Image (spheres, helix red, strand yellow):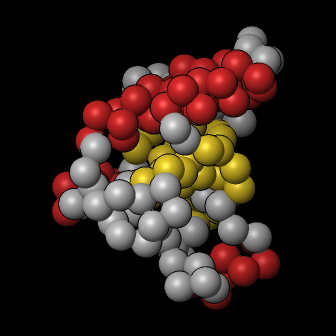
Amino acid sequence: HAPTLVVLPRAISAARKSVYSDPPLVYAALHLLAETYRKVKLGQEDRLTLKAACEALGLSIGGSVDPSNAGEQGDEYFVRWAGRRLFLDQHLAKGSSRDPRFALRIYFHWLQDEQRVLVGWLPSHLSNSKT
């Protein structure tokens, strides 16, 4: 999905070290971002289509953390791309467990100017004020 999705090296590295129990779901979630999410952002699909696609995979989609709290975690929620510092403001999620074998999180940012998704972290939780 290179034209529609970028997975940063730090996300690839985290995935290689991961103990997440359902790698096929990670691939399905990335496909959802590259296809359905992108089409919604471009106005080619309805948000209800995205919601249904997420639900079919057992995923939820929403904001990552409040921007005012993101800085409390250092640079975890921020990435560098094309000379800019970007906030990973969105995430896909499955499971409420903190156990990395069963909880999936994919943190991403929509690159409006490039019309593609930038994945900055997966498949585990990033820190937040609750951890």
| Image quadrant where residue 103 sits | bottom left
- Compared with 116, 85 (above or below) is below
In front of the other: 27 or 9:
27
Residue sitting at 59 percent across and 32 percent down? 54
- Compared with 43, 66 (above or below) is below
Residue 70: percent from left, percent from top: 67, 76
**Seen in the image, is 67 located left or right of residue 30?**
right
**Seen in the image, is 117 located left or right of residue 43?**
left
Residue 89: percent from left, percent from top: 68, 57
Residue sitting at 56 percent across and 47 percent down? 92
Residue sitting at 24 percent across and 60 percent down? 18
**Seen in the image, is 36 located left or right of residue 14?**
right
- Compared with 51, 120 (above or below) is below
**Seen in the image, is 106 located left or right of residue 100?**
right
| Image quadrant where residue 59 sits | top right
Q: Quadrant of the N terminus?
A: top left
Residue sitting at 66 percent across and 24 percent down? 52
- Using the rendered image of the protein, determine whether residue 109 is visible from the camera's viewpoint: no
- Compared with 15, 30 (above or below) is above
